[in-house]
Image: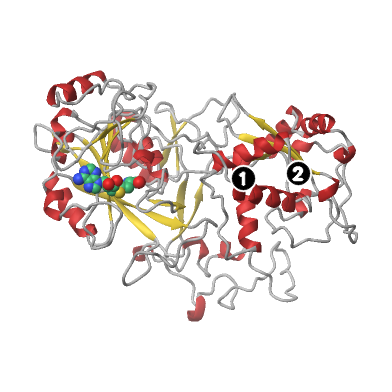
Amino acid sequence: MTSTAPDPSQTAFVSSGLAALARPSRLVFPIDSPVLLAKLIAASARTTPSARPPLRLTDLARFDSILSAFSRTWEHGTVVVHRDDTGNRTLVVLDVQLGPSALPRPAKKRKRPVRDEDADSATGDPEDEHVDADAAPGEDEHADPPTSPSRHLSRELREVYAILQRGTAKGRLLAERFRSTNAFEPVCPRITKDDCAKFRAQAQGADSGSSICPRVHFRPIIRAHTDPSLGHCSYLNTCYSEPTYALSPSIPPLPSAPRPPGTMSTPVSLPSGLGAGGRGKEKAPCRYLHYEVDWDEGDGSAFVANSNTSQGGVTFSQRDSSKEVAKAQEFKLPIGLGPTSEDKPLLPPQWINCDLRRFDYSVLGKFHVIMADPPWDIHMSLPYGTMTDDEMRAMPIPALQDEGLLFLWVTGRAMEVGRECLRVWGYTRVDEVVWIKTNQLQRVIRTGRTGHWLNHTKEHMLVAVKTRTDSAGNIVYPSWCNRGLDTDVIVSEVRETSRKPDEVYGLIERMCPGGRKIEIFGRKHNTRPGWLTLGNQLGADQLYEEDLKSRIQARYPERISISNPSAGSQSIAR
Ligand code: SAH
């Protein structure tokens, strides 16, 4: 049996779950198999909460093979699938039709919205919008039978019908037209145009003109009662005193409040009980600073240093009046190509099976990124051997890097020991990522298996940097590192004991595209293109970097045939 071969309980689970979901037409086609699997699992959790479903979200390959088998023969009807071989090879379910044996009892009529026969399938079926696609099978036993016109067709014709039901180019274009565009409007870290212009003038030198950046700026609202020396109100535009707050569409109008003559707005029931201008219980206007967006024609387009005009103390560049003023330019975060400044294809995953306490790190060369999830001695029973604090401190991490980033997972008492190790190894901690653990239903885990005082819902990964110094002794941070792209929170599902979320690789690879990356204390599932993984549960080594292979062969001559990953499963430096 291969690793993706399903067992009978899994096949039965998919078969009955699919029939239950298809019976009340709760599926909208085409549907990607990962989404369908999530729906089946969610539906079974609702109907039989105590039973563990025999398939998990990670069993996608098995699920796909079950669906493929059903597309040939399925006891309840017909399943039409299609595999997209061009892109990510996702299995797409084009249609599921129940056969006569699976059709439900006649049922009471349900009101249906009028259907526009001209509506294009790709823009969405109006009926489907009224259906809770996630509702549990069985909850709607008396729903109408499927009314698909394809029900009485032969299998072949049903396949043709299902293909015809797929989105057309016209539909996709229409859907694209109405898709909300990226609403990300980056805010200038200097906040006001004045400060932005001053900052840029300082940074770029006096002759650069005082242009401002194309991001969004704010200007302070100075009212009679404002005292700028107090600084900004922490509620800002959500302060009850702010007139703009009263315009929020989520605040209900005061019961039967008449609209004051000459105004467009109706008095609203602010939480303070006052109209805007009152401040909570104090019934006084807020004296702190508030802000409004400072947007002038031409803002957001590229400003040129020359031919400037002055407005309100800030100098703006003149734009070509014959051209239409761009409202805002698409903002792209500057993303560098990483340490090598090249966009090269990554090497396939490489790994070395070894005992990291004894392995000679000098053969590995230098890395731009290190990630480590050590077997800290956290006084807990773990399915692998742990390392003492002294062994951890003594690890030759400094040999692996001259300049670069180190990502170190820490938990429990290792939150302190880990920080100490960073200092011993010569690193500066600059950040910390938390991983919020979710369960299969994508809810936050609240009854953790770890934690003596509180249940642990999160894990921590320290972000540290090893820097060079310039001739004057100043610290020089790695210039190739893309900063400010990701946030420091990952929300992701828990998997096997100690297994960390895959999202972390995306975060690291965005900070450091390309370059050499090593993961120590990794397992087989951690191996990735562009990374070298070291650990003692990896099996036969796999190496592609020629110089690395020859250094290892020279240092460990007893090692046979590491150049051919399939030739042996011997590990090095035992
Ligand atoms: N980050 C991993 C989990 C790491 S658990 C994941 O996402 O799955 C720690 C790993 O370190 C285990 O595989 C353990 O077997 C390995 N390990 C423990 N002691 C080791 C040693 N001395 N040398 C190499 N690997 C070791």
Q: Is residue 469 left or right of residue 512?
A: left
**Quarter residue 445 falls in:** bottom left
For the residue marked with disc 1, what is the amino acid? Answer: Val
Q: Residue at x 11, y 46 (%)?
A: 394
Q: Residue at x 84, y 51 (%)?
A: 103
Q: Is residue 336 above or below residue 279?
A: above
Residue indicated by mark 1 = 35
Q: Which mark is residue 241?
A: none
Kindly tell me whether mark 2's CB lies below 8 Å from ligand 1: no
Local crowd size for mark 1, using a 10 Å CA cut-off: few (<14), some (14–19), many (≥20): few
Q: Position of residue 224 (x, y in %)?
A: 47, 66
Q: Residue at x 46, y 37 (%)?
A: 214
502 or 323, which is in the foreground?
Answer: 502
**Quarter residue 457 falls in:** bottom left
Q: Position of residue 294 (x, y in %)?
A: 49, 47
Numbered disc 2: secondary structure: loop
For the residue marked with disc 2, what is the amino acid? Answer: Glu
Q: Is residue 471 left or right of residue 136?
A: left
Total numbered labels: 2
Kindly tell me whether mark 1's CB lies below 8 Å from ligand 1: no
Q: Is residue 289 above or below residue 318?
A: below
Residue indicated by mark 2 = 75
Q: Nearer the viewer, mark 2 or mark 1?
A: 2
Q: Specify whether residue 434 is in view.
A: yes
Q: Is residue 230 above or below residue 461?
A: below
